[in-house]
Structure formats: C-alpha cells, structure tokens
Amino acid sequence: MGGRVARVTLPDVGVSIVEGHDTPPAKALVRRRGSLLFAHFGLSGPVILDVSRAVSGHAQPQALTLVVDLLPGKPK
C-alpha cells in the first residue's frame, strides 16, 4: 500500500467477494457496505473483516477476487 494512503478511512465503501472473476457474470459470495481502512500492509476495517469470513471458509480462497466500490451510491 505504501505510506501515502495508510491510515486513511473511507466511511462508506461497497465490498464484494466474487467467484469466477474470469467469466462474467461473476458470482458474489458476499456483499457488504461499510467503513474501510487503508492500513500500512493492506486493507482493514469493519467491512473487510466482515467479508473475510467468506474467504477463510472457502475451499479455494485463491480463486476468489475482492471487488471494492469506492463510490457505492453513484450510478455506474
């Protein structure tokens, strides 16, 4: 992450864990919205900790992709 964005918190971010990222449509295992923290060594915060359960309980976590929507209230 580098030091430039470390300790920056975004209060409203959409986060999804998706399966099958190479062939649309990807299947979302979990979707959450909440606070995200850019930490010194990655992402943290309530929303990341919440979706991490889907990764840790998955048989093939390396096949999953994290999708972060920094502007979840804006139309795409």
Image (tube, helix red, strand yellow):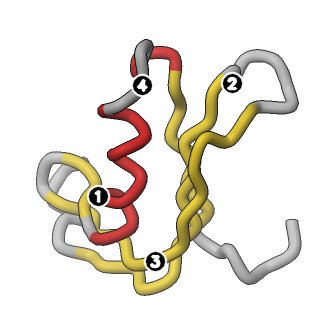
Q: CA distance from mark 1 to mark 2?
A: 21 Å
Q: Position of residue 11 (x, y in %)?
A: 42, 86
Residue with the mark numbered 2: 21
Sooner in the amino-acid sequence: mark 2 or mark 4: 2
Specify the amino acid type for callout 4. Answer: His
Task: Report if the CB atoms under discs 2 and 4 are less than 8 Å apart.
Answer: no
Q: How many residues crowd around disc 3 within 10 Å: few (fewer than 14), some, or many (20 or more)?
A: some
Q: Nearer the viewer, mark 1 or mark 4?
A: 4
The circle on residue 49 is: 1
Dot 1 falls on a residue whose secondary structure is helix
Q: Position of residue 17 (x, y in %)?
A: 54, 42
Sooner in the amino-acid sequence: mark 2 or mark 3: 2
Residue with the mark numbered 3: 34
Q: CA distance from mark 4 to mark 3?
A: 22 Å
Residue with the mark numbered 4: 58
Specify the amino acid type for callout 3. Answer: Gly
Sooner in the amino-acid sequence: mark 1 or mark 4: 1
On-image quarter of the C terminus = bottom right
Specify the amino acid type for callout 2. Answer: His
The residue that appears at 42% across and 52% down in the rendered structure is: 51
Q: CA distance from mark 1 to mark 4?
A: 15 Å
Task: Report if the CB atoms under discs 3 and 1 are less than 8 Å apart.
Answer: no
Q: Nearer the viewer, residue 25 or 50?
A: 50
Is 45 left, or right, of 22 in this rendering?
left
Q: CA distance from mark 2 to mark 3?
A: 23 Å
